[in-house]
Structures are given as structure tokens and as C-alpha cells.
Image (cartoon, rainbow, N blue to C red):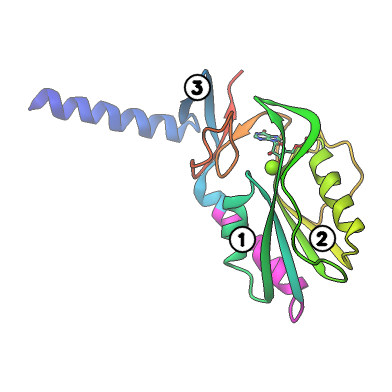
Amino acid sequence: MRTKISYYFHIFAGVLYSKNMGMKEIQILDKRFREFIPEHTIQERINELASQINKDYAGKEVICIGVLNGAFIFAADLFRKIEFKARITFIKLASYAGTSSSGEVKELIGWNEDLKDKSVIIIEDIVDTGVTLEHTVDNLIIRDAREIKIVTFLLKPGAYKKDIHIDYVGFEIPNDFVVGYGLDYNGEGRNLPSVYTLIL
Ligand code: IMP
Ligand code: MG
């Protein structure tokens, strides 16, 4: 009994210790990651973003376009907090293989909504080089959207190579690979409620 209690105590203390030191670590496939943006910080920031967007769009009508797969969790959390008239649709793009961008965007699920003269908000999980974002914006221009704004959960300013203005940014992060809150490493880790960064 004693051993058991002390065993649990050690586990508990270990979790506390690593949390306090900001060192909560996890393993995904062959890589280790460290907690970087905790769940409560993410949720607080989403509340701030939503109230800003609600102010800017009060009385308007909008179509939100979530970019799958990565943005599905962020889009769901943000969309629930939207108070103006809004619809949501998704496109599915892929440009990442492992931990780096392939530089080429593949369209896996395309465009089926009429966007002519519509006000559109693109919802991205992360803007890295900006190749995916540019691809999405170009498609909206071709489809004659009237107004295009962009909200991204994360932005890597050090990697961003385009000059498309990003209207709403959850967090600016260093140019490191991250997982969690919808973002994956080779398909894993999307279900983590916090964001974790790769330990090199
Ligand atoms: P970009 O086209 O280089 O801007 O890359 C954008 C896409 O790559 C994002 O929508 C993500 O799906 C993926 N991506 C970029 N950086 C990361 C990362 O750090 N972790 C996981 N996926 C990422
Ligand atoms: Mg994405």
C-alpha cells in the first residue's frame, strides 16, 4: 500500500514538476515534443479573437472557409463564438510531408459553394511559408468573392514569404514544428488540446 501511494505520489509530483517548469513532454512516433501553448491560453485567445471579429462584422453576413485538415478544431471553436450571420464550408488542402512544407499544394476536397460577391473569412490552422494561403486566396479571387479576410490560429513570421495581409492572428510563433489543437505530425497529435513544439 505504501509503495503504491509513494509510486502515485512520484508520478503526481513528476507531472506537477514538469508542468511548473513548462516542460510537459510527449512522444509522437519518433519525435519528442514539449508543451508550448497550454489549452487555457488557447481558449482565452480564441475568446479575444472572436470578440474582435464579432465587432468588425456586426450586422454583416459571411461565409467562413475552414482549411482542412488542420483548421477543423480551431474553426469549430471560433465558429461557435461568432454572433453575426455566418455559414461555414471547408476545403481540403495538403502541402506538408513530415515536418516540412513540400512547397506544392494538393487540393483534396475542392470548392462547391457560390462565393460570387460574398464576404469570406478564411480560417487557417497555421500560416508557415504562405503557399497554402496564397493558393486559397487566389481561388477566392477567381471565384469573385467581394471581401476576403484571413484568420489564422498560428503564424510563423520567420517563414512567411508572401505579402498577403493576415487580418487576425491567434499566436505568432518561432519557426519550429508544432503539433496539437488540430495540427499533426504525420497524421498524429491533432487531438491534443494544447500546442506542443518539437524538441530538437
Ligand atoms: P504553408 O503552405 O507553408 O504556409 O503551410 C501551411 C500548412 O502546412 C498548414 O496549413 C499546416 O497544415 C502545415 N504546417 C505548417 N507548419 C506546420 C507545423 O509546424 N506543424 C504542423 N503542420 C504545419
Ligand atoms: Mg493546414
Disc 3 marks which residue?
29
- Of mark 1 and mark 2, the one earlier in the sequence is 1
Side (left or right) of 160 relative to 5:
right
**As displayed, is residue 48 above or below residue 103?**
below
Q: Where is residue 21 in the image (x, y as percent from the top left)?
A: 48, 31
Disc 2 marks which residue?
149
**Image quadrant, ligand 1:** top right
Q: Where is residue 3 in the image (x, y as percent from the top left)?
A: 13, 22
Q: Where is residue 170 in the image (x, y as percent from the top left)?
A: 68, 51
Residue type at numbered disc 3:
Leu
Quarter containing the N terminus: top left
Residue type at numbered disc 2:
Lys
- Of mark 3 and mark 1, the one earlier in the sequence is 3
Q: Position of residue 88 (x, y in %)?
A: 66, 64
Q: What element carries label 2?
A: strand
Query: Magenta span: helix, strand or loop, mainly?
Result: helix
Name the one closer to the observer, 21 or 158: 158
Q: What element carries label 3?
A: loop
Name the one closer to the observer, 156 or 192: 192
| Identity of the residue drawn at 75% across and 64% down | 113
Q: Is mark 1 on a helix, strand or loop?
A: helix
Q: Distance between the residues labelled 2 and 3?
A: 36 Å
Disc 1 marks which residue?
78
Report the span colored magenta.
43-60
